[in-house]
Amino acid sequence: MRPPYSITPLILKQISSISEKIGEVKANYLNRPSPQLRKQNKIKTIHYSLKIEGNTLTQDQVTALIDNKRVIGPEKDILEVLNAINVYDTLTTFDPYSSKSFLSAHGLLMNGLIKDPGRYRNQQVGIYQGSKVTHLAPPAKNLPVLMQTLFKYLKTKDELTLIKSCVFHYETEFIHPFLDGNGRMGRLWQTIILLKEYPVFEFLPFETLISQSQESYYNILANCDKLGDSASFIEFMLKIIDDALAELLNFNNRILTETERIEYFMMCGFHEFTRKDYMNVFKNLSTATASRDIKRGVEMRYFTRTGDKNRTIYQIIIGKP
């Protein structure tokens, strides 16, 4: 059974725009960001996703914790960040189509923060604004069937991954499968679903834009609940994704530096290579520039060199980023 949502003309337009930008990302060698960019994006993702939930730590404090430095702040907030670091460091190990993996991620994310992390709630919960109930979640006894149905929907090939990721995010908020952590799990799992098909989403920090539109985020969730249709939430999230991709492209709308090209090449799966292989990755690069890059890579101890002239072969040094 498919969750209730309709496909609007705006959704189709947004899908087209996102697809074009993902093509540009690949063309600009950003589908596998440099280690520096990956780290920056991880910091933003963790900071803003937890900020939405009321975490008070600054971006500098999150950076310090990622760098294994001591931070002074509320114990709960520090633990939230440490848990999130643990999850985002292992992001690619989660299976987006597995409820067991979903529960495991929640267990890591909420470890030490709630009782029985990694388990669906066993009691009725509601969302309050003051003393007013704004959303009454489905009964706990219905959770196994509801979540099983939702994961079955994820596996269907009849819908685009971009749409399914938004629907799963919304349904996680609506079903409210956990006593706490539902918002951060909805955003996390949307990333994991997208990552399966698009590597760029590993640390694309769209939580930054959600945080900047937090009131709209919650208002649209509430409105979808009333309508029984998540189309407007899909529209909202697709715009967030489109804007995040636009920011990534705008930030990187420049010629890659020598070091960025070398670091990108390191992640392309080569064990050994020739200058021609290097130029096949960077098709607009001149022979002279490719030679300078590789020479610099040898100096930086990213590569080793054997042979001479046309028979020169380079090896990737294992353990380098």
Image (cartoon, rainbow, N blue to C red):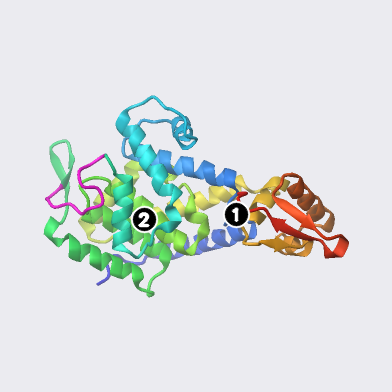
Q: Is residue 277 magenta?
A: no
* Amino acid of disc 1: Leu
* Residue at the extreme top: 72
**Residue 271 falls in which quadrant of the image?**
bottom right
List the residue tagged with mark 2.
Answer: 189
On screen, residue 297 versus residue 91, left or right, reads right
Q: Which mark is residue 30?
A: 1
**Residue 177 falls in which quadrant of the image?**
bottom left
* Residue at the extreme right: 309
Q: Which mark is residue 53?
A: none
* Amino acid of disc 2: Trp
The location of residue 247, given as percent across then percent down, is 54, 47
The location of residue 262, given as percent across then percent down, is 69, 51
Q: Where does the magenta region start and end?
A: 113-125
Rendered residue at 42%/66% (across/down) = 161
Q: What kind of secondary structure does the magenta stretch mostly adopt?
A: loop
**Residue 311 falls in which quadrant of the image?**
bottom right
Rendered residue at 72%/52% (across/down) = 303
Rendered residue at 45%/57% (across/down) = 92
